[in-house]
Image (cartoon, rainbow, N blue to C red):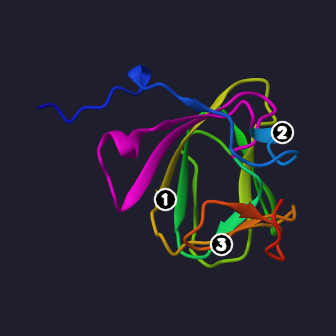
Amino acid sequence: MSKRIDPSKVIPVTGTDYPKPHDAPCLRRERKKLGGLAKLTQFGVNLLRLPPGVWSSQRHWHTGEDEFVFVVEGEVVLVTDDGEEILRPGDCAGFKANDSNGHHLQNRSKHDAVVLEIGSRDERDGTFYSDVDMRIDPGSDRYTRRDGSPI
């Protein structure tokens, strides 16, 4: 049985499950969940396509998961607490678990960008969003405000 995954045959998941209005910048993002097709359990691998003007996510950080991105094609702007950096094909960046320096990618160019995303999978992970009043608590898949109240 072949282990080869042909990304061109993988149906992308478009959009986000963020609650309104936080969903708007990410509605047209496309993720091909390659790690799931390989039945990986310890880390995820996504091929992310960002059309012009689209964000990878709201700026965020994880309490229990490491993340790594590698730009395959196009150009994205990495936004962190330290400022902005342009990433082009071959550039990469990593984000250690429990580092509260929130991050995300924005495509400000006129062309699609493609990024390989790799992240650990930890059921104890929590996610905090740097610029909006939103979080996900460890063991939950429900978005709440920072104070824990429902959105």
Instruction: Specify whether 24 is left or right of 13.
Output: right
Q: Amino acid at mark 2?
A: Ala
Residue 26 vertical position relative to residue 143 in the rendered view, above or below: above
Q: Is residue 83 above or below residue 96?
A: above
Residue toward you, 11 or 109: 11
Q: Amino acid at mark 3?
A: Asp
Q: CA–CA distance between discs 2 and 1? A: 23 Å
Residue occupying the point 20% across, 36% down = 3
Q: Residues within 10 Å of mark 1 (few under 14, many from 20)?
A: many
For residue 119, which numbered disc appears in the image? 1
Amino acid found under the numbered disc labelled 1: Gly
Q: Please give left or right for residue 99 compared with residue 84 in the image.
A: left
Asked whether residue 83 is drawn in magenta, I would say no
The quadrant in which the C terminus is found is bottom right
Say whether marks 2 and 1 touch (CB < 8 Å).
no
Please give the name of the residue rendered at 35% of the width and 62% of the height, measured from the top-left corner: 42
Q: Position of residue 89 (x, y in %)?
A: 58, 39
Residue 55 at x, y percent in the picture: 75, 42
Distance of label 3 from label 1 (alpha carbons): 18 Å
Residue hosting label 3: 137
Tag 2 secondary structure: helix
Q: The residue tagged with tag 1: helix, strand or loop?
A: strand
Mark before the other along the chain sequence, 2 or 1:
2
Q: Earlier in the sequence, mark 3 or mark 2?
A: 2
Magenta region includes residue 37: yes
Where is residue 145, by image quadrant? bottom right
Q: Nearer the viewer, mark 3 or mark 1?
A: 3
The residue under label 2 is 24
Image quarter in which the N terminus is found: top left
Residue at screen point 68% across, 68% down: 61
Range covered by the magenta-colored residues: 27-56
